[in-house]
Image: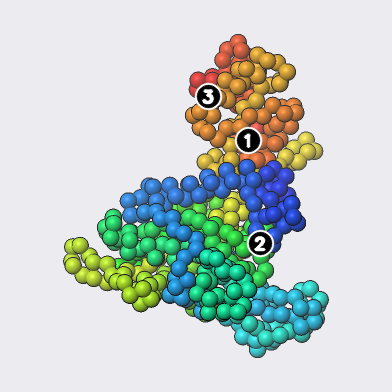
Amino acid sequence: MATKLEDIVSLCKRRGFIFPGSDVYGGMAGTWDFGPLGVSLKKNIMDAWWKFFVEKRDDMFGVDAAIIMNPRTWVASGHTATFADPLVECKECKSRFRADKIAEGISESVTTEEFLETHTKCPVCGKENWGPIRKFNMMFSTHVGAVLPEDTKENPELAEKNIAYLRPETAQGIFTNYKNVVDTIYPNLPFGLAQQGKAFRNEISPRDFILRDRECSQMEIEYFVRPDAWEADFEKMRALQHEFLEGVMELPAENIHELEVPAEDRAHYSKRTIDFMFDYPNGEEELMGLAYRTDFDLSNIQRESGKSMEYRDKNTGETFIPHVIEPSIGVERLFLAIMSTAYTEEEKDGKTRVLLKLPENLAPYHFCVSPLLKNKPELVEKAREVFSMLKQKYGNVTWDDSGNIGKRYMKQDEIGTPKCIVVDFDTLEDGTVTVRDRDTTEQTRVKIEEL
Ligand code: GAP
C-alpha cells in the first residue's frame, strides 16, 4: 500500500518526532518543532552527513558562520535584487499565491501575460480575476541595534542603515570565510567548505508538512575548484551525492531522479544545476540541488569588499579566482524522504503492524531494554543492569516497562528501534536475553556479554 503523507504526519505527532511550531498558540505557518524522537533522528542524519562529507575526507573542512550577516553580503550575492518568487493576488478574495505553484507548465520567471494565458482559477474562491505578477523578495528582514519601528518610519535612512536579514542560504557564510580559511589552513585545490545550519525563507505558500518551510536547516558544501576542472569535479560531486543518499541514507535509487534544470529556471548564480528529485508520498519534489556557481560569488565579494579572493597555486605560482560546485540539501526534505521510505504497514492475523524500517545508524534508539514483568524486582534490577551497560556503550538506548510486552514491541516498531532486548526468568539462570528484530519480529537468545 502506498504511504500517505497524512500517515507520516500523524505518526510524527503521535510518537514525538515533529510538532507544529508554536502548537500551543495555534501554530505558526511554515515552522515545525522537533520533539525528542525527531531531534534524535535529525541529529543522526546531520552527523552521518558530516562524517561522510567532512570527517572521512581530507579535502573538506567545516565552518559555522553567524546567521545574521553584514547586509552587503546579500547585495553582493544578488539576493537583494533577485531572490524573489512570482506573487499573484486574486482580486476577488484577496488570497495570494506563488503563481508557478498554482498554474501548470510555467516557471518561476513567468510574466503576467503568460500566467493569464493559463486561465488558472483561484484555488480558494474558484474565480479567474487576477492582479499582475509581482516579485516578492523572500528574505526575512530585521533591525539590528536599538532601533524602534517608529524611528524608521520617521527616518527611512536609519531603517536602511540598520536593516539586516536572516540568511536565506548557509552558503554565503562559507563564501565570506573562504579567504580566512585559505589564509589560515592553506588548503590545496580542490577543497570544500561544509556548513550545517538554519536558513530562512518567507515562502508565499509553505506546504506539504516539512517539505517547504519558512525556517529550515541546510547542509551545504562549497567545493572550490580550478576553473578548467569544473566539469570533472561536478561529476565527482554528483557521484558522491548518490553514494550518500543511496549508500548511507539508504534511499531507494529508483525513487531518486535527476533533473537537468533549464537555464530559465536556474538560480541567478548558476551555470548548471541538477536537481535531485525524490518520489515523496505527494509526488515528485526536489530533495537537493547540485549547482555550478562559477566564480560568481567570490568575484562579487571581491568587488563589493575590495579584498582579493584570488588563490595562488603553490606549485605553479598561478593566481586565479576558484570556481565552485555546490551540493545543497535541506535536512527536513531528507528527513521526510527517509521517513517515507521507512514507513511500512504490514497485515498480520487481521491486524495492522506499523513500523519504521529506519537504517540502524539513523534510528532514534539503537536498542530498547525491558524487564518481561515490571512487578518482579529481580527482573527489573537485571534489566537495569543491561540497560546501563548498553547506554554507557552506545548512548542511544531506551528503557520501556510500560504496558505488556506486545504493546512495547508495537511502540518500538513505530519509532523504528531495530532491536528490543527483554530480560526474563531464564536471564537470571543462564545470563541470556531475548533479542527481537524489528523487521522480521524474529527472537533469538543472546548472552548479555555478547550483546
Ligand atoms: N545555496 C543554494 C540553495 O540554497 P536552493 O535550491 O534554494 O539552493 C537548497 O536550496 C536546498 O535547501 C533545497 O534543495 C532543499 O533541500 C532545501 N530547501 C530550500 N528551501 C526550502 C524550504 N523552504 N523548506 C525546506 N527546505 C528547503
Residues at marks 2 and 3, CA–CA distance in whole angstroms: 41 Å
Which amino acid type is marked by label 3?
Met
Foreground residue among 303 and 131: 303
Residue to which mark 2 is pinned: 30
Hey, what amino acid is under mark 1? Arg
Q: Position of residue 194 (x, y in %)?
A: 42, 56
Residue at point 75%, 80% (across, down): 90
| Furthest-bottom residue in this view | 113
Residue at left offset 58%, top offset 25%: 387
In the structure shown, which secondary structural element does the residue marked by tag 3 occupy? helix
Q: Which mark is residue 389?
A: 3
Of the two numbered discs 3 and 1 in the rendering, the one whose residue sits closer to the viewer: 3
| Residue at left offset 42%, top offset 70% | 292
**Marks 1 and 2, Cα distance to the nearest angstrom?**
33 Å
Disc 1 secondary structure class: loop
Query: Decide: marks 1, 2 in contact (CB < 8 A)?
Result: no
Indicate whether 438 appears above or below 126: above
Q: Residues within 10 Å of mark 2 (few under 14, many from 20)?
A: many
Q: Position of residue 252 (x, y in %)?
A: 56, 52
Compared to residue 344, the image places residue 438 above or below, namely above
Q: Is mark 1 within 8 Å of ligand 1?
A: no
Q: Quadrant of ligand 1?
A: bottom right
- Left-right relation of 372 to 161: right
Coordinates of residue 44 in the picture (x, y in percent): 52, 45
Q: Which mark is residue 438?
A: 1
- Measured along the vertical axis of the image, is residue 370 above or below residue 66? above
Residue 253 appears at what percent x and percent y?
Answer: 53, 55
**Comparing labels 2 and 3, the label whose residue is closer to the camera:** 2
